[in-house]
Amino acid sequence: MKSLLKEHFLKNIPLKDEQWNFISEQFHSKKFKKKEYIIRKDEAVSEIYFINSGLVKLSVDDQNGNEHIISFACEDWWETDFEAFYTQKRATQNLKCIEETEVLALSYQDYLKILKTIPEMTEFFLMKAVNGHIANQKRILSLMTFSAQKKYEEFVKSYPQIIQRIPKTTLALYLGVSRETLSRFFSESQKL
Amino acid sequence: MKSLLKEHFLKNIPLKDEQWNFISEQFHSKKFKKKEYIIRKDEAVSEIYFINSGLVKLSVDDQNGNEHIISFACEDWWETDFEAFYTQKRATQNLKCIEETEVLALSYQDYLKILKTIPEMTEFFLMKAVNGHIANQKRILSLMTFSAQKKYEEFVKSYPQIIQRIPKTTLALYLGVSRETLSRFFSESQKL
DNA sequence: CGCGCGATTGAGTAATTTCAAATCTAGTGG
DNA sequence: CCACTAGATTTGAAATTACTCAATCGCGCG
């Protein structure tokens, strides 16, 4: 299995070979095509996903049927409907592929098994959760503080690699701005 | 020490008496008056705080000098500048008391000591971090999805206990809405 | 009593959305 | 390889939402 996962762990936590072997056995690869759903609202969420290749979006639909994107995730990121996963309830969110995507899936049972067998891994997941919390705080500030234009500029600055891979219409759903408004800022910045 | 902390832990994780004794020794009580700062931007952040009584706000000031509130925290909540605390850098956020507040402070060193001595506590903090992540996702959706009025109504619904303790001007800074706009919705809903 | 903070109200303004139409593009099947 | 189609983008104009500025009011506390 040619994957980023081993390196991803070792970057953050020392693991003996037998520990890594045990961990890697708990994951299984799943492949999805563009526009396929990994998690669909109202379904059970039994797995957390490490994105090995590709790009996905985590989103919800409001009562008017409008989509709102909570986050994007690409290579080297973890994603799932966290509330559903950790409480073992049904999904309130959708996880859908923007590109063809390969994930390494870890079931809730196997996740618990890893924590039990290799307690140091709890620290690893703690660190990931804390980083997610911090990233979300920044997003909250961005949504509260910035004008539509500033939000767009900050996104370009923060995620230059991702921006070419996302349709602008989709980016608008992440920034909380209408696609028309975003388009106007985009053509302005092209002129310069 | 008459505190909520023991119960707070035991609700979530079984602890033997000697474990609790060890943990409680790492905390020390600090009292702050209304409007006092617990954390001030640019200062070192060496502690995480469990709010034993009172009410605080976590905020940042933007380049125009406008304040934006990331979160409120009252009894039974943990708060700090998480990025500064975990990376041991200087604060980018302010933590300031809305009411007279007593916190139980835990230094970074003592936090690490607890994790090392009682590894199960890592799970506890993981759970807290995950819950924070989930709460932030909901906040992000609220900011993206709702009109100013809906944001106010949802806050009232979600935190009826806190709302009476916060000046409306301060609530506006949390909702990302001007105080005048908020005031108009408030008088409307009073009329009904 | 008077000060200071918070809340309210009105009027004008700015930012963004919505609606509508035209254009462009990439991918599909023939 | 071309035509076709669905999705994405752009542009314009009108409508809406929320903001800013400014003035006033109210109230609790020293």
Image (spheres, coloured by chain):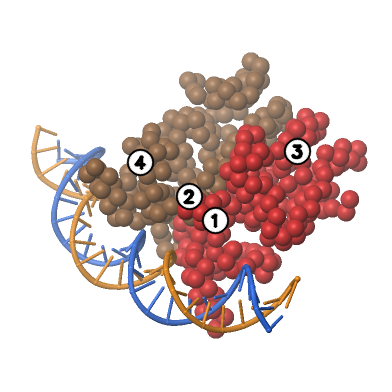
Chain colours: A brown, B red, C blue, D orange
Give the foreground label among 2 and 4.
2
Q: Decide if residue A156 is on the left or right side of residue A132.
A: left
| Amino acid found under the numbered disc labelled 1 | Glu
Q: Name the residue under label 1.
A: B67
Within 10 Å of disc 3 (Cα), the crowding (few <14, some 14-19, many 20+) is: some
Answer yes or no: do the residues labelled 1 and 4 have beta carbons within 8 Å?
no
Which residue is identified by label 4? Answer: A166
Q: What element carries label 3?
A: strand
Q: Would you name the residue on which mark 2 appears?
A: B63
The answer to whether marks 4 and 3 mark residues whose Cβ atoms lie closer than 8 Å is no
The answer as to whether the residues below labels 2 and 4 share one chain is no
Query: Is disc 3 on the same chain as disc 4?
Result: no
- Determine the chain carrying the residue at label 1: B
Above or below A78: residue A117: above
Q: Where is residue A118 in the image (x, y as percent from the top left)?
A: 70, 26
> Residues at badges 3 and 2 in contact (C-beta under 8 Å)?
no
